[in-house]
Image (tube, helix red, strand yellow):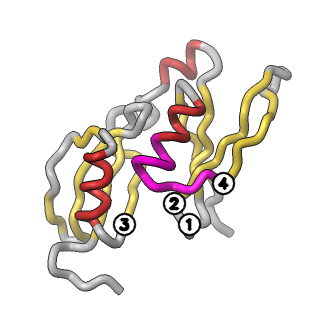
């Protein structure tokens, strides 16, 4: 058993794909035509970190209720956690790609962490090894 996908509500498929594959270096796993439950056209868009089993379904908002949830899926809390082997490289790449960080890097018992917002405004933790801690 494993968690396969989690959905992120986005306002535009293509902008979200560009963010996740560019700024976060995710792989685009699937981008296929599909339909909503009531037969309207949509896309099935899945991205995931390289080598990961679990991915994100990028779900374009359909209607006011879903539009209102964009960026608020976790009620203002950090709801997603991206662990990387090289924190400094990834942080620099994300800053250069225009990612908004809402906290400075800090060191915690579990490693380095900084909070950022995704393209929809949801908060994430960027996590890496503590400074001067060898990776396994």
Quick check: 25 left or right of 127?
right
**Seen in the image, is 122 located left or right of residue 127?**
right
Pointer 4 residue: 29
Q: Quadrant of the N terminus?
A: bottom right
Bounds of the magenta segment: 19-29
Q: Position of residue 9 (x, y in %)?
A: 55, 32
Q: CA distance from mark 4 to mark 2?
A: 10 Å
Label 3 element class: loop
Q: Label 4, label 3: how many angstroms apart (C-alpha)?
A: 19 Å
Q: Residue at x 56, y 17 (%)?
A: 65
Of mark 3 and mark 1, the one earlier in the sequence is: 1
**Mark 3 residue crowding within 10 angstroms, few (<14) / some (14–19) / many (20+):** some
Tell me the residue that label 2 is attached to.
49
Residue ranking furthest to the front: 96
Residue 118's x, y, as percent? Answer: 39, 39
Name which residue lies at 19% across and 71% down: 109
Expressed as whole percent of the image width and height from the top left, the position of residue 56 reads 57, 49
131 left or right, relative to 117? left
Q: Answer yes or no: do the residues labelled 1 and 2 have beta carbons within 8 Å?
A: yes
Mark 4 or 2, nearer chain start: 4
Q: Secondary structure at mark 1?
A: loop
Task: Report which residue position mark 1 lands on.
Answer: 52
- Tell whether label 3 touches label 4 (CB within 8 Å): no
Q: Residue at x 42, y 51 (%)?
A: 24
Q: Secondary structure at mark 4?
A: strand
Is the residue marked by circle 4 packed among few (<14), some (14-19), or many (20+) residues within 10 Å?
some
Give the labeled residue for mark 3: 84
Q: Is residue 92 magenta?
A: no
Q: Which of label 4 and label 1 is nearer to you?
A: 4
67 to 91, vertically: above or below: above
């Amino acid at each position: 058993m494993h968690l396969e996908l989690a959905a992120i509500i986005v306002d535009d498929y293509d902008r979200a794909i560009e963010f996740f594959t560019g700024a976060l270096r995710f792989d685009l796993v699937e981008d296929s035509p599909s339909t909503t439950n009531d037969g309207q056209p949509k896309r099935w868009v899945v991205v995931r970190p390289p080598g990961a089993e679990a991915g994100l379904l990028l779900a374009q908002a359909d209607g006011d209720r879903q539009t209102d949830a964009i960026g608020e899926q976790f009620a203002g809390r950090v709801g997603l956690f991206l662990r990387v082997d090289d924190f400094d490289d990834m942080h620099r790449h994300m800053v250069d790609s225009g990612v908004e960080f809402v906290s400075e890097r800090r060191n915690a018992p579990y490693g380095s962490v900084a909070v950022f917002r995704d393209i929809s405004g949801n908060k994430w933790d960027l996590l890496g090894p503590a400074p001067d801690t060898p990776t396994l």
